[in-house]
Structure formats: C-alpha cells, structure tokens
Amino acid sequence: MKQSILALCIVLSLGACSPNKDDPNKDEKTPPPKLFEAQRDALDKAKTVEGTQQKQDEEQRKAVEQQTQ
C-alpha cells in the first residue's frame, strides 16, 4: 500500500512539472533580451566616426600635397 501511494505521489509530482503547451501565460512572441545593446550601439557609432575621420584625413593629405607642389 505504501509503495503504491509513493508511486502515485511521484507520478503526480512529475506530471505537475511537465511543460504545458496550452499555457495562456506563456507568450511565445516575447523577444529575447537585448544584452549589451548600448555597448554595440556605441561601437557602431565609433566605427562610423572612424570612417569619417579617415576620409577627412585623406582629403587633408591631398590638400597638403597640392599646396606643396
């Protein structure tokens, strides 16, 4: 008798832990958290500024070369 009650308790406890696909509280459209988004945005902005700076440096070098000739 004790074994059947123990087995029943184990089965019920494992059944209670199984995922329920019909759970109304589960929102599958929730996007994943955006980790390090601020850092990535800052890095992208720095890369953009770097490209602009390199372009300006090249233009300045060309202007200096033209003035020295």
Image (cartoon, helix red, strand yellow):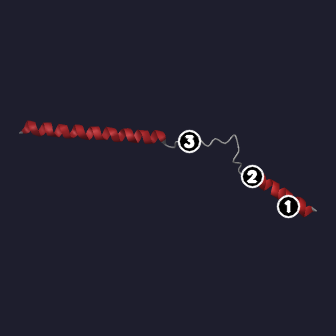
Residue 24 in the image: state x and y as whole percent: 70, 40
Above or below — where is 49 with respect to 19? above
Q: Residue at coordinates 56% horizontally, 41% vertically from top-left?
A: 31
Q: Residue at coordinates 33% horizontally, 39% vertically from top-left?
A: 48
Residue 30 in the image: state x and y as whole percent: 59, 40
Q: Disc 3 marks which amino acid?
A: Pro
Task: Report the front residue among 54 and 29.
Answer: 29
Count of numbered badges drawn on the protein: 3
Instruction: Rate crowding at label 3 as few (under 14), some (14 to 19) or many (20 or more) other CA atoms within 10 Å.
Output: few
Q: Return the mark for residue 31.
A: 3
Q: Disc 1 marks which amino acid?
A: Ala
- Residues under labels 1 and 2: Cα distance? 16 Å
Say which quadrant the C terminus sits in: top left
Q: Residue at coordinates 34% horizontally, 42% vertically from top-left?
A: 47
Instruction: Name the outermost residue toward the right.
Output: 1
Q: Return the mark for residue 7.
A: 1
Q: Secondary structure at mark 1?
A: helix
Which residue position holds label 2? Answer: 17
Instruction: Rate crowding at label 2 as few (under 14), some (14 to 19) or many (20 or more) other CA atoms within 10 Å.
Output: few
**18 sits to left or right of 46:** right
Q: Secondary structure at mark 3?
A: loop
